[in-house]
Amino acid sequence: MTRIYCADHHGSSAPCEECRTLIAYASKRLAVCPFGAEKPVCAKCQVHCYGRAMRDKVRDIMRYAGPRMMWRHPWLALAHVLDKRYVAPPRPKAPARRPAARKGPAADASAGPESP
């Protein structure tokens, strides 16, 4: 979708610097998504991964490129429509954090006696 938007708005065949930054940001956010392979479309997701400014930019891109995908990439557009019907899984719980190791004299005393 970003390539369609960039080609029509920025006039370049390859994504411009601004659009490449957005693609890299989206890739980075998807890589750390707690849903993994079961990630729903953003509209149905309970976790908002993107910052406000990037979310607004992505929304603008999707509004423009979404209808045009039917002509340029019909199978991807159909897959996206079907993905919208997918019910989002419940929000995953954050993994339990391990307590930090204690530092100081109490931690040294619990290590045991030193050998000569």
Image (spheres, grey):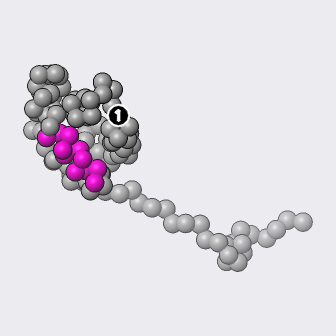
Q: Residue at x 32, y 48 (%)?
A: 34
Q: Residue at x 26, y 56 (%)?
A: 52
- Quadrant where the N terminus is found in the figure: top left
Is 103 included in the stretch rendered in magenta?
A: no
Span highlighted in magenta in the image: 53-63
Is 73 left or right of 92, judged from the image as shown? left
- Quadrant where the C terminus is found in the figure: bottom right
Residue 74: give x, y in percent of width and height. 13, 22
Residue 25: give x, y in percent of width and height. 36, 44
Relative vertical location of residue 42 with respect to residue 97 in this rendering, above or below? above
Q: Which residue in the protein does label 1 denote?
A: 16
Q: Quadrant of residue 63?
A: top left
Q: Residue at x 35, y 57 (%)?
A: 94
The residue carrying pointer 1 sits among few (fewer than 14), some (14 to 19) or many (20 or more) residues within 10 Å by Cα, namely some
Q: Quadrant of residue 31?
A: top left
Residue 32: give x, y in percent of width and height. 38, 46
Depth order, front residue of 43/20: 20
Depth order, front residue of 70/105: 70
Mark 1 lies on a secondary structure that is loop
Q: Quadrant of residue 113?
A: bottom right
Residue 22: give x, y in percent of width and height. 33, 42
Specify the amino acid type for callout 1: Cys
Q: Main secondary structure of the magenta part?
A: helix
